[in-house]
Amino acid sequence: MFRECGYKSCEKTDAKKLNIHIISHSHDDVGWLKTVDGYYTEDVSHILTNVVNSLDKNPKRKFTEVETYYFNRWWSEQNNETRDLVHKLVSSGQLGFANGGYTVNDEGSAHYNEIIDQMTLGEFIWGGSADLGQSANIFTTILHNHYSAPDSMATSSIEVLSRKESSFGAEVLTWDRALTFSPQSFTTITALPRGNDINDKNKKQKADTIVSLAKQWNKDFGDTNHVLMTFGDDFKYNNAEHYFANLDKLANAVNEFHPDVHMFYSNPMCYLWSVNQLNRTFEYRERDYFPLWSGFFTSRPSLKRQERSTNNLLQISKQLDSMTRIPESEPFLNEAMNEVSVLTHHDAITGTSPQKTIDDYILRLFSASDALQEVTNRMYRKLIPKQELDISLPKQIICDRLNISECHVSETSNEFTLVVYNPIGRPVSQWLRIPIPSNNKPIDANNPKEENTKSNGELKGKGFTLSLDQKTGNIEKVKMVNGNEFPLKQSFKFYKSNHDSSYDFCSEGQAVKRIRNSHQKDCGKFKESISDNYYPIYERILLKDSAKGMQLTVLTDRAQGGSSEMDGQIELMVHRRLLTDTRTSLNETGVDGKGLVVSGKHFIFFKPINESSKLFRDLDQRLFMSPLITFSPLTQTQAEYRNKYKTSYSALNQELPQNVHLLTLEKWTQNELLLRLEHFYQKEDNNELSKDVEIDLKNMFKDIKIKDVREMTLSANQELSESQKSRLQWKSKNPLNNIQFNSNQHFNDISKVKLSSQQIRTFILTIEDNTKKVNCSLEWIKITGTKIPKNAIVGGFDIDTKPLYICRHKRDDDLLPGKANENIGCVVTMGGKAFSTKSDYEVLIGHNYDWVERHGGDAVPDRAFIGGHDLNSNPIYVGKCDLHFGKTETQVVGKIHHKFYYGFGDTERSDCANHMVMSQLNASQELQEMDNESTSVETMDGERDGKRRRLFGKELRCMMYGFGDDHNPFTEAVDMLEDLVIQFIQDISLKAQDVGKNGKISVEDVLHCVKRDERKYCRVRDLFPDQDVGKNGKISVEDVLHCVKRDERKYCRVRDLLSMNEELKKARKAFDEIKYVSNA
C-alpha cells in the first residue's frame, strides 16, 4: 500500500546469509477450463477465505494476491468482521497485491486502451498501488526461458535493467524474473493424498533439497544472496492451512539445519526492496520479451471483434457520462467496465479457453452491450432535448447488424432520425451505412449491357489505379498518379496445423520494429522459421521500401497474427480452425454446424514513406473509436423535432490537434473527471505532426468549468509527483539517461500542458458541479464523527433533554434506523443489544413529514417512511415513543420491525406498544407546491403537463429513501419505475391497444415481467395482449399516462406498486449494498 509502511513490514534480512524469500501465491485465472463463475464459486472464494484465516493464525505468514476481479467479488460478500481482519492483514504486510489490474491481461490481442482501463479499474477498486508489476502476458516470462535462460545464466544476468524501444527518449525501468510457480519437486505440496507433506522423517532431506536449489539459483541469477522462491500454482491454497503448515515446517527445517541460510515469508515488494538496498550495479538490456505461442494472435476472430466493438461503445458511454453526470449511470457503466475488463484476461481475448468458457465470455459482452445501450439512451435524454428534464426523446436504437445491411428502424419506418456521436475529439469524414428498403428508393433501370473484357479491369481511384487479374479478381498492380507502377499482388492461402508453433513476443504502445530472424541474439536457435516470425498485430502491419521511398501499410479491424516471411511480402492470419489440439479443439462452428465464417476488413495504404504515417495514424484512431450511430422512428414533423431537440452538439470548445487522441474521458466522482491525452505520433513520423503540442485544459470543454487539475500516474491511482518520490533507484553498467517527467503535476493556476511524441498524460480534473439536484424533502446524509447537521430532523429528546436525531447504520446485512446525538454518535439495536458508532452512519434531514399513532400490532400506515431493511429485504420503519422514568419524561427514537425497538444503555427494549410512526408527505417540494395550485386538470396546458411529468419523475426518486442524496447511485427500483411510468410513456400510449382488454394490465403481470427480466427493465409494451383482465389489482394504462396530471394527493395506482412490489424490496437492499460499498 503505502511504500514506507510496506517496506517496514518486510522481515529483516541477514547480509551474511543466503536469504530465501518464500512467495506464497495462487494463479487464479479469470476463466479458462471453467467459466469465471465456476472458478469463483468452486475455487477462488474458498481460497481467499481460507488464506485470510490462515494468515490470521500466524503473523509471520504472507500471501500475494493478483486477480483483483476475484478479490473484489469476494470482498463484497464479507461481513464487517472479516473486512476489518483484511484491513489488518494488508496494513501489517501479510496480504499484498501484485500486478494490480482487474485481471492478468494479455498484450498480444488486447488493445493498449483496454489494458490501461482494466489496470485503472483494478487499482481503483482496492484503492492502492500494486506491490510489483507482473508480466502483462502470462505466456511471456514462463516460456521465454526455454530460449534465453541458458545464456542469461552463463552471464548471471537473469535479473537485469531493461529498456523497451522508445521514440521520445525516456527509458522505462523494468525487472525481469524468470520463475513463476513452485520449485520442482515441491509443486505437489498440496496434492491429496498428502504424500508429499513435510514431517520429522523427511524434513532434513526437504531442507537440503531446497537449499541446494537456492544456492544454484543464487549463483545463476546474479549472486545477490537473495533468492525468490514462489510457492503456488493454478488455484492452489484451497486448503490454505495445509499449504502454510508445510511451508512453516520447511522454513523451520532450513533455518535449523543450515545456519548459513535464512528462509522466511516475503512478497515481491520485500524481495525487490532487499535487492535494491544492496546498491549493486546490474546488467543493462534493450530488448523485448515476446511469447512462444503465436496461434492465439488470431484464434476466435469473432470474439476479438465483438470485444473491440463493445469497448468502443464503452468509451463513448464514458464520454457521454462525463458530460451528463447522471447518478443512475453508475450501475450500468460498472457492469460494462467489469465485463470488458474480464475479456482482457490472457485466456479470454486470446481465445485459448474451451468453447463453454468462450460462450460465457460472449454472454458477458452481450450483457455489457445491453447495459451500455440502456445507459446511452438515458444520457441522450438529458443531452439532446433543448428543455432540461424533457423525457420525451424517442428511444435511440443501435442496429447491431449494420454490417449486413440490416436495421429494423430504417427498413420499416417511413421517416426516422439518425444520431451520430463522434468520440475522436475532432471532425471525421466517414460514410454511414444505412439500410433502406428498395421500394422506398427509386432505382435507375437503364443499366448498360454487361460485356466481358479481354484486358485487366481498372478501378480508377483518387491518386492511383488498380489493375485486377481477369480470372481471380485479385489485385495485380497499382499505378500512382505520377505514372509510377508497382506490383501489388493479393492471395488467400492456408496452413496445415502444427502443434509446435510456439515462440515469444511483447507488444508495446508504439510501433515495434521487427527484423526477420533477428531477436537480439539471445533467443536461442530457431526451429520453426514460419512461426518464429509471427507477431501480434492489433492495429497495423507495414513494409518499407527505402530504395523507392514507398510504404505498404495494412490496418486490421481486430487483433490478428502477422508476418513477413519473404522480402516484399505481408502475411496476415485471419482465421484458425483446428480439429485437434494439445488441450482443447479450436473448432468453432456456425448454427449450421459447419466451420464459422467470419467477415472482416483490411485497410490498405500504398504511399510514399513520408506521407504514410499521417494517413494510417489517423485511421488507426477512427477504426478503434468509431462513431456511434443510433436510429429512432420519427413520430412528429421535422420542424417539431428541430424545435424540441438539438441537432448538433460538441462538448469541446475547439477540436483537438491532429496528433492528439482523446484516450480517456470518464466521470471519476460527481465533481471529478478522468482525462487521458495521447500524442500518437512517433518522432520520425512527420516533420510537423511529431512535434510537441500544447493543450489548454482550462478552455478545453464547453460546458464544464475546471477548478483544479492533478497529474496522475497512468492508472490514475497516485499523483505523479508522489509516485516519483517512492520510485526505487537502480544502477546500471550502461547508465540510463534520467527519466524526464513534466514537473507541472498540479495546476493551481490552470495553464497549457505539453504533450511530447508518443506520450500519454493522465489528469484528474476537479470541475464545478452544475448538475441539477433533486430537491427531496427527506434525505439521508453521510456522517463521520458526532457533529450533527443543523437541518437534521429531531425525533425526540433524551433524559437530559438533549435532542435525539434520526440516524441509520448498516450492520452486516441489516440497515438499521436508530437515534443519534452529538455525544454518542448513532445508536442502533439488533438481537437484544444496542450498538453505537461514530463513523459510517447517516442522519435524516429535511421536512414535510408527520408522525402517525400506531397501537400494538396495528398495520403500519400507508405512507410510513422506510428507514432501512433486514437481511431478507423486509422494510424497517422509523418510530418514536414517550417514556417516563419517575418524574423524568423522555421521547426515544428507534426502529419499527413488527414491534417498536429502542436502545437503552447497551440493551435493546421493546416495551413501548403505543408509539408513533414517521410518515412521509409529498416527497418532492416542487410537486407539493404544484399540488397546492388551483389550476385544474381541464385547464392544464402543455407546458404545465410537461413540468408535471418531470416532477413526477422526481417524486419517484424521492419516495425511495436515500435517493435524494447527491452522491448516491440510483437503484433498479427507480430505474424500473421510470421505465414503466416515464421513459416509455410514449411507447405505452402507442401500444395501449395491445395490452389486454380496454388497456388494462394487472399488477401481478407487471411484477412477473420485472422478475423474469434479470435486469428489471421491463417495458409495458413487452406484456402481451392475452393477459388476464380481472377487476381487482388492475392498473389502467390510461391511469399510468394521466396520473401525473391529477391535482390531488394520491398519484394513481402506481403507489400500489411501491407498497406491494416484492422486487422493490430487493432493489432497496441492492441500493444500500451499492451505496455502502462505494462509501467504504
Image (tube, helix red, strand yellow):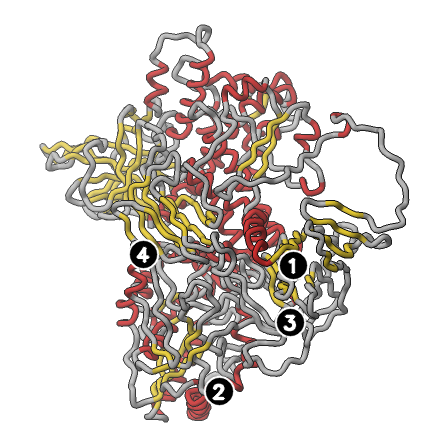
Residue 549 picture location, percent across and down:
62, 61
Helix or strand or loop: what does disc 4 sit on? loop
Query: Is 444 situated left or right of 101 in this image?
Result: right
Q: Of label 2 and label 4, which has the lower sequence position?
A: 2
- Residue beneath disc 4: 719
| Label 2 to label 1: alpha-carbon separation | 41 Å
At 20% from the left and 43% from the top, the residue drawn is: 904
For the residues labelled 3 and 4, say whether their Cβ atoms are less than 8 Å apart: no
- Residue beneath disc 2: 153
Categorize mark 3 by other alpha carbons within 10 Å: few (<14), some (14-19), many (20+).
many
Q: Of label 1 and label 3, which has the lower sequence position?
A: 3
The one of 19 and 781 positioned closer to us in this rendering = 19
For the residues labelled 1 and 4, say whether their Cβ atoms are less than 8 Å apart: no
> As shown in the figure, which amino acid type bears the numbered disc 2?
Met
For the residues labelled 2 and 1, say whether their Cβ atoms are less than 8 Å apart: no
Q: Of label 3 and label 4, which has the lower sequence position?
A: 3
Helix or strand or loop: what does disc 2 sit on? helix
Q: Of label 2 and label 1, which has the lower sequence position?
A: 2
> As shown in the figure, which amino acid type bears the numbered disc 3?
Asn
| Label 2 to label 3: alpha-carbon separation | 25 Å
Residue 634 seen in the current view: yes
Please tell me whether residue 494 is drawn above or below residue 557 in the rendered image. below
> As shown in the figure, which amino acid type bears the numbered disc 4?
Glu
At 71% from the left and 62% from the top, the residue drawn is: 576
- Residue beneath disc 1: 552
The one of 516 and 351 positioned closer to us in this rendering = 516
| Label 2 to label 4: alpha-carbon separation | 38 Å
Q: Which mark, by number, is residue 533?
A: 3
Query: Is 50 situated left or right of 637 in this image?
Result: left
